[in-house]
Image: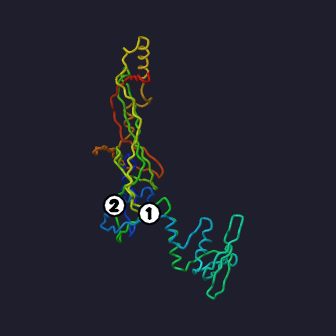
């Protein structure tokens, strides 16, 4: 879909993204390609607009059917091993033009109706050996299959059946195409849709600078958003918004041509291990004199900086430019990355979303269950 690149995307924590494609095209048709697992979300959300005043006449996609049922409507069935032999076999009775190499480098054309294909048994199985053709003069000619160079189908129904077979075979791919019919002329299109997308993650860094005594100080808190490019194209200068929160989401099967018994609703709860909670700081009165001295020594040892560094904290804060606007959006929270993001196909990226100085105070915590 490089003809209509992604310009903006909004990523959520529940595995769904909102995408905006925009660009100029000329013609009466736009083809969009999606993964098979994306097509249901696309069909329930796809919206196409023409900023140049043209018209969107319709959106078309191939009706999914059982592959065996679709191929049963075709007179042509090709295998993966001997497809050309299978084609000539299924074209029995149809008119063809065969290009036969009669001598090295010289190809002659013979027309007529296919009688059949004779096979020979080889060490690799049965293989086509002879092709027989009935000419207009009622003369039967046999040609070595190895000398066959071209096949021209003159029968219109056979042409249609072959095209139908190939289209059906292609529909079994992991990708699905959606065609947008447009009015004639030039168009400035913008396309909106929702599709599955890997959940974005966040990674934090904390750089502490202790005051005298080592129990208090200031710390630099950094936050980086991790996102993946699952699309089959490079993302170039895309506006990215990262939304903290998991909206209720479900999959409704719009692609399959059947009446579902009920909507497929799936609300997947994620359970993460929680932090160990403490009621209070351990008091030195809990220990005898020898243990108390050990606790004081442990406190002094743990008062060392959290991250060893050679740069002052202020310089480290300036080195990471955070181009993010935060926005409270109801029950969710958004990070609008104002600097355009570029990510190659199949790659991931980290974008800065937070950089702030905070005050900290060290605490020694005691967990009675773990002593």
Q: Which residue is mark 1?
A: 177
Q: Quadrant of the N terminus?
A: bottom left
Residue under the point 59% across and 76% down? 151
Instruction: State whether residue 73 is above or below residue 9.
Output: below
Residue under the point 35% across and 71% down? 185
Q: Quadrant of the C terminus?
A: top left
- Mark 2 lies on a secondary structure that is strand
Say which quarter of the image contains residue 271: top left
Question: Number of marks in the image?
Answer: 2
Residue 54 bears which disc, if any?
A: none
User: 360 or 119, which lies in front?
Assistant: 119
x%, y% of residue 212? 36, 21
Q: Residue furthest top?
A: 289
User: 312 or 74, which lies in front?
Assistant: 74
Q: Which residue is mark 2?
A: 47
Instruction: State whether residue 76 is above or below residue 288.
Output: below
Q: Say which label, 1 or 2, has the lower sequence index.
A: 2
x%, y% of residue 256? 42, 61
Q: Residues within 10 Å of mark 2 (few under 14, many from 20)?
A: some
Figure colour scheme: rainbow
């Amino acid at each position: 879909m490089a003809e209509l690149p992604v310009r903006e995307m909004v990523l959520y924590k529940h595995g769904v993204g909102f995408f905006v494609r925009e660009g100029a095209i000329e013609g009466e048709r736009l083809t969009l390609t999606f993964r098979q697992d994306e097509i249901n979300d696309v069909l329930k959300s796809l919206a196409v607009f023409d900023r140049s005043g043209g018209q969107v006449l319709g959106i078309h996609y191939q009706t999914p059917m059982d592959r065996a049922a679709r191929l049963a409507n075709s007179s042509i069935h090709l295998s993966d091993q001997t497809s050309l032999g299978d084609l000539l076999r299924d074209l029995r009775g149809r008119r063809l033009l065969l290009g036969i190499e009669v001598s090295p480098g010289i190809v002659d054309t013979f027309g007529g109706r296919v009688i059949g294909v004779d096979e020979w048994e080889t060490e690799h199985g049965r293989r086509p050996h002879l092709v027989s053709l009935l000419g207009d003069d009622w003369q039967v000619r046999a040609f070595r299959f190895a000398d066959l160079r071209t096949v021209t189908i003159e029968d219109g129904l056979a042409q249609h059946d072959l095209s139908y077979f190939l289209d059906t075979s292609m529909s079994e791919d992991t990708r699905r195409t959606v065609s947008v019919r447009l009015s004639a002329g030039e168009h400035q299109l913008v396309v909106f849709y929702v599709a599955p997308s890997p959940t974005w993650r966040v990674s934090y860094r904390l750089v502490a600078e202790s005051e005298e005594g080592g129990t208090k100080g200031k710390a630099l808190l950094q936050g980086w958003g991790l996102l993946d490019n699952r699309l089959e194209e490079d993302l170039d200068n895309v506006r990215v918004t990262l939304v903290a929160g998991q909206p209720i989401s479900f999959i409704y099967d719009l692609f399959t041509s059947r009446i579902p018994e009920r909507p497929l609703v799936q609300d997947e709860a994620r359970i993460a291990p929680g932090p160990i909670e403490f009621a209070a700081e351990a008091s030195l009165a809990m220990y005898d004199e020898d243990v108390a001295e050990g606790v004081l020594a442990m406190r002094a040892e743990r008062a060392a900086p959290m991250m060893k560094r050679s740069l002052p904290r202020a310089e480290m804060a300036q080195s990471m430019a955070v181009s993010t606007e935060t926005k409270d959006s109801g029950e969710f929270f958004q990070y609008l990355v104002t600097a355009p993001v570029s990510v190659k196909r199949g790659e991931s990226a980290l974008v800065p979303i937070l950089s702030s100085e905070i005050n900290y105070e060290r605490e020694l915590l005691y967990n009675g269950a773990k002593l």
